[in-house]
Amino acid sequence: MFNHLLSLLIWLPVVGAIPVLLAGSGRPNAARWIALAVAVLTFVLSLYMLPLYNAADATKQLAESHVWIASLGVHYNLAVDGISVALILLTSFVGILVIVGAWEVIQTNPHQYMSAMLVLEGLMIGVFCATDALLFYVFFEAMLIPMFILIGVWGGPRRVYATLKFFIYTFFGSIFMLVGLIYLYLKAGSFDLATLAALPLSMKEQTWLFFAFLIAFAVKVPMVPVHTWLPDAHVEAPTGGSVVLAAVMLKIGGYGFLRFSLPITPDAADAYAWVVIGLSLIAVVYIGYIALVQEDMKKLVAYSSVAHMGFVTLGIFIAFMLVRGSNNLDAAKLGMQGAMVQMISHGFVSGAMFSCIGVLYDRMHTRQIKDYGGVINVMPWFGFFYVVFAMANSGLPGTSGFVGEFQVILASFQANPLIAFFAAFTLIIGAAYTLYMVKRVLWGDITNPHVAEMKDLNGREWFVLGAFAAAVFALGIWPQPLIHLMDSSVTQLVTQLGNHKI
Amino acid sequence: MPNLNDILILLPEFYLVAAACLLLLLDAFMKPEQRPVLHWLSIAVLLVAIYLVVAGQPSQAVTAFNGMFIRDGVAEILKVFSLLTTVLVFFYAKPYLQDRKLFVGEFYTLTIFAVIGIMLLVSAGNLIMVYLGLELLTLSSYALVALNRDSRLSSEAAIKYFVLGALASGMLLYGMSMVYGATGTLDLVRLHTAAGHTGMPHLLVFGLIFMIVGIGFKLGAAPFHMWIPDVYQGSPTAVTVFIGSAQKLAAFGMAYRLLASGLGDLSQHWQLMLACLAVLSLAIGNIVAIVQTNLKRLLAYSTISHMGYLLVGLVNAGPEGYAASLFYAISYAITSAAAFGMILALARAGFECEEIDDLKGLNQRSPWAAFLMMLVMFSLAGVPPLFGFFGKLLVFQAAIHAGYLWLALVGAVFAIIGLYYYLRVVKVMYFDKPVEGTEVHLQKDVSVRLVLSLNVLALLVLGIVWGPLFGWCQSVFVG
């Protein structure tokens, strides 16, 4: 059974969604408990994977290979490296929290909500495991279906607009990647990622492919200027949808850069690294300013997500300047590592922020910042958690938000101090927009009589926010286990960057 | 003189003709309330035909009646799936026809005659045979479209179909006569060799153009698509499901016999023509579908765009492209049977469930129906892991391999545009509130529910295990 651990991780939640659905609308509690059991079991399995994975070895592990389509040479290939393991853990961790978070919040068809969540979780784990490009694409696209339903059915007033925009944007990005992948397949005779990485390609081919991949993953991350779906999707999505979207789905964009753009088109990626770096800096600085003026809490956090994901893309592509420009492998590794830590950390922090907003929304049914004020007076525990996550979001040392950003800034300083200068802006702007929100929501006098009636966290909410807070602190104070887990994989990736393919 | 061997080769066809005549007789002597017996008998007849096709399949391609008729792998796979989709049609049609007092024996016999037409068409080894098969198919179809005699819409659709169909048949015949003039033969195999060294190459290409018009009409590819929306909308839905599914396989078979078997040497001429038809179909089908409010019309425009994708594969003009297109045709036939089957299953006496708005809030009325319809829509849109996606993948691959990267990119762009209207159907079912006072739910009939569920779930299963089917598609074009 454990020879197929990765398959089990993918299919357990997907298949587990069937009993949840069958439990039916008549027995919502049965559906909830089954969903929780499946999510917990998935998390336990992903923890079980941890000791089986040898972090010192950079090769892909726990591999599974079955022929899928013999005549085309398409395989059902799964394997993980340190980066995948970390992201799978994040996914299954968040998977439990969104189920608990939705417990009594979702009242209409909870069984459908829970099963969509589970299917989504399984497919996202599949994305992180797939080492065959076609399989990756199938998971990558299939993921859109449950998310489309989640936003569209349980979302806010403009949910239809938001979810259509989300689906069409992402589909738009990925269909060009599909054409690119077919081109690669015809050239290499295989969809296997390792084969594609070894395939020599001319600069012209690499450039076209690089931009095909860039469209797909830039939409997913999202990068400026294709980020506009994200604020809409976040604002309209139910809390759980926002949490999954911010915590895991955006990471798939960053992960795609690592798996496709870097190994398959290294020379084009190097040549056009300035494009990505430029867009990342725009995200960090300009989107930061946009976040500052938001009136809607979810929108504010959504824009802050765009800014934070800018650090991820910056960290990934700054590595090119360092490896190829000055052959500074250590700094490149630092940048890449920073990007990875930032991905995981942002998963926790943004997930937590959206959960906090969900807590407020459930009580007041508004997300407008101006409707709040003085919340700390009636909800001290909530205030505590909110401040913790706000600090992490602004990158305070001791929280997870600090580690990745600091590493990326250090690395970019060695590439070009000017880049580091703009990247470091986030320390000011990030703190500004987050703390400004905290000030308006938590502090001050209670001006809205409804705020005075709000009750503090119940046990379920306490559990969700407490789990997020524990993760944020653990990663902030002792990031070493995570860095160690990904170390050899990152090192290997950085050395790959130096390989010319022309 | 035909010998016994020839008759054995045509056994499935002869059997079906005999069975259809018997069913016609039986119907004449049957009381109306006994008619369900006819329904089950017809299904049994088709299932036996599938068995005869598969069991009697020779290991090598064989011909009968001096090359008029070919029984090869291509014919086998097309026959199996046309018969199979017709079985689905019969299952879905019964309650619909009963509710509308259209439950008559003619529906079954005409459909079976149309299927015989399909079988002759896809097995044709001679231009005359192509024409005969096509006429048998279309003449039966004209009558089927007019089945609901009292409906103005139905009669109008039938007249439109007939006039345009006759025109297209004329074009096809005219093209065939030119090809005959240029090469001196009607036999497809001899045509293939003769086409290379004809003294009148211009006449041959001219004939080819006329033949492509006929094929374009049969496929419903733009700019020969005018009949599709009206016929789809006007026919009783039970007939639309047949025209929309099994007949697309026939159209592929006809295109393959004429273009690949017959005029394969002229591929450098017809590749570009098909590419143009493909682009036009993709554009017209996908863009016009966006503004449709009638579900049947929407699916009609969606058909046009899907035929565009099928042509994208044919442009490859090699075994790889034929296999991809065949796979696409099969996947489309099964998906489209499911799509129209859903409309049939949601309709009831006095209510057609034809407008997209009729599906409002379906998820709250009947979650299972909404789920099935969602899978169908995502398959049509080509979202993995559903069946429709892999068809698109294969045709894109075939086009890129033949050097038509631009065509694949055009296809990709229109896939995004097409996505919108499929998503709109899902949106209506899942995100909108049901209209007060309406009741939309699945048919009570157990056989319809069961077969429809299996049909739709097959889209999911075949999306995951599509290897064997694709292997079959590939194997028939080898050698």
Image (cartoon, coloured by chain):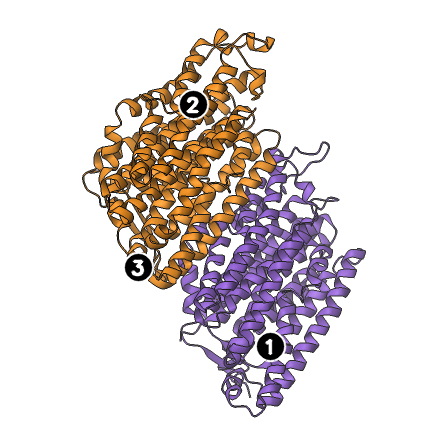
Chain colours: A orange, B purple
Looking at the rendered image, the disc whose residue lies closer to the viewer, 1 or 3, is: 3
Alpha carbon separation for disc pair 1 and 3: 47 Å
Q: Amino acid at mark 3?
A: Leu
Pick out the residue farthest to the left.
A56
Q: Amino acid at mark 2?
A: Ala
Same chain under badges 2 and 3? The reply is yes
Residue found at x 46% / y 36%: A283
Comes first in the chain, label 2 or label 3: 3
For the N terminus of chain B, the quadrant is bottom right
Report in which chain the residue with disc 1 lies: B
Residue B139 appears in view: yes
Q: Secondary structure at mark 1?
A: helix
Report in which chain the residue with disc 2 lies: A
Q: Is residue A226 left or right of residue B101?
A: left
In the rendered image, which residue does mark 1 sit on?
B130
Pick out the residue farthest to the bottom.
B199
In the rendered image, which residue does mark 2 sit on?
A431
